[in-house]
Image (cartoon, grey):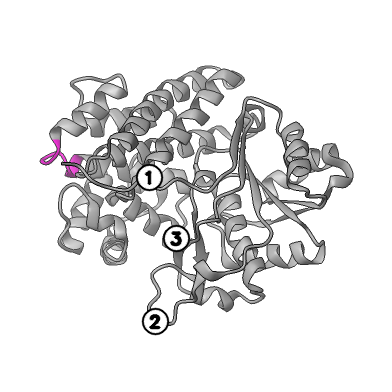
Amino acid sequence: MLSGTHRFPRQDQVVYGRPAVEVLRELAAAYGAKRLLITTTASLADNLASRAAAELGELCVGVFSGISAHSPREGVIAGAAEARRLNADLLVALGGGSAIDATKVIQICLWAGLTQVDHLDPYRAGRGGDRARIAELSVGVRMIAVPTTLSAAEFTNFAGVTDAARHAKEGYAHALLAPRAVILDPAMTLATPPRLWFSTGLKAVDHAVEQLCNPQRAPFADALAEDGLQRLTGGLAASRADPTDLEARLECQFGMWLAISGAGAGRGMGASHAIGHTLGGSYGVPHGITSCVALPAVLQWNESVGAGRQALVSELMGAPGVPASKAVRNLAKGLGLPTDLKSVGIGPESFQAIAEHTMHDAGVKVNPRPISGPADIIEILEIAAG
């Protein structure tokens, strides 16, 4: 008999298919918020964020654009300082996974009064006896997310932030880290560079595939991942054919929402995510590109186990009878994305270090084919080398 627990993010609502600024005004009124701070990246500060701020008028007290790729701690601390200076009562994360994850942890800084980079140390997930009791924090300022990519960070209660000193991306979790509301407005994604849109789409595919191939079954989560994978496969192809097709973009947003929601089953992701965390946090490979490179290789290495699950993946992607690894690789190539390590500047000389670092990631423990040590990770990296 199957048994398990599915945990839902503590979000009030997800609003889709409506103009983001219109919804922001409504939500601010409903929450009693009068001082919104938009948190974003430099690439969006002078266009999308500034236009949103102008439309919000006096309701928006500022735009903080000090967040960069992989959410460095420095940007998190600076963002919290800006929120305090402006007396913001609601944060609006506008952008992709880096902006949203950073803003999640900015919340922790505001709740706990953290003002220095090293103040974050006790709040990292996986700490021992010196870990801060993060669940006991007095919750204050919350956030809303307006995503512009398909990373799906907005639907989880955990965040990844990079500690530059350790060259590592580290996790933070709290039941109320998930944005209070999410606004899926496909028009807000039109300015997203194609490579970023499609690569984060592959990250969303990775969410679905690693859930579906997990050895542990969870019917509710599996159903979400199945529908999400189908929507993503079709939506990505359609938005490639016509970048202005808002229906296709919304279909992609629905797909990534469904795909990540399966994570609520608590099964964890597999080796693709584990390797991706290392490639991103330690080697600077963009968040979505890590899945383009790692997922096909992991699927190929896992072929000897769970053949039925991989066959289902292929069918859902419209490629019945094709190996799942090839179906994913073909999708990535069709979207103009790299699928090998050489294309992202990673050579064999780095494999041992990547493997040893990856062995500390929880994803290694739930991979369908057991991973016994760094040598197994190196085998996957050799497949990914092309």
Q: Which residue corresponds to the image point at 24% horizontal and 43% vertical from the top-left? A: 214
Residue stretch in magenta: 300-306
Real-space Cα separation, disc 2 to disc 3, in angstroms: 25 Å
Given the image, on which type of amino acid does mark 2 rest?
Gly
**Quadrant where the image shows the N terminus:** top left
Q: Which residue is mark 1?
A: 263
Q: Is residue 301 magenta?
A: yes
Near-viewer residue (196 or 369): 369
Q: Answer with mark 2 or mark 3, whichever residue precedes in sequence.
A: 2
Query: Are there few (<14), some (14-19), or many (20+) residues within 10 Å of tag 1?
Result: many
**In the structure shown, which secondary structural element does the residue marked by tag 1 occupy?**
helix
Real-space Cα separation, disc 2 to disc 1, in angstroms: 27 Å
Name of the residue lying farthest toward the left: 304
Front position among marks 3 and 1: 1
Left or right position of 146 against 128: right
Confirm whether residue 385 shows in the render.
no
Query: Are there few (<14), some (14-19), or many (20+) residues within 10 Å of tag 3?
Result: many
Q: Is residue 103 magenta?
A: no
Near-viewer residue (235 or 211): 211
Q: Which residue is mark 2?
A: 129
Real-space Cα separation, disc 3 to disc 1, in angstroms: 21 Å
Q: Which residue is mark 3?
A: 281
- Prevailing secondary structure class for the magenta stretch in the rendered image: loop
Labelled disc at residue 171: none
Q: Answer with mark 3 or mark 1, whichever residue precedes in sequence.
A: 1
Question: Where is residue 219 shown, x and y percent of the image?
Answer: 28, 35
Given the image, on which type of amino acid does mark 3 rest?
Gly
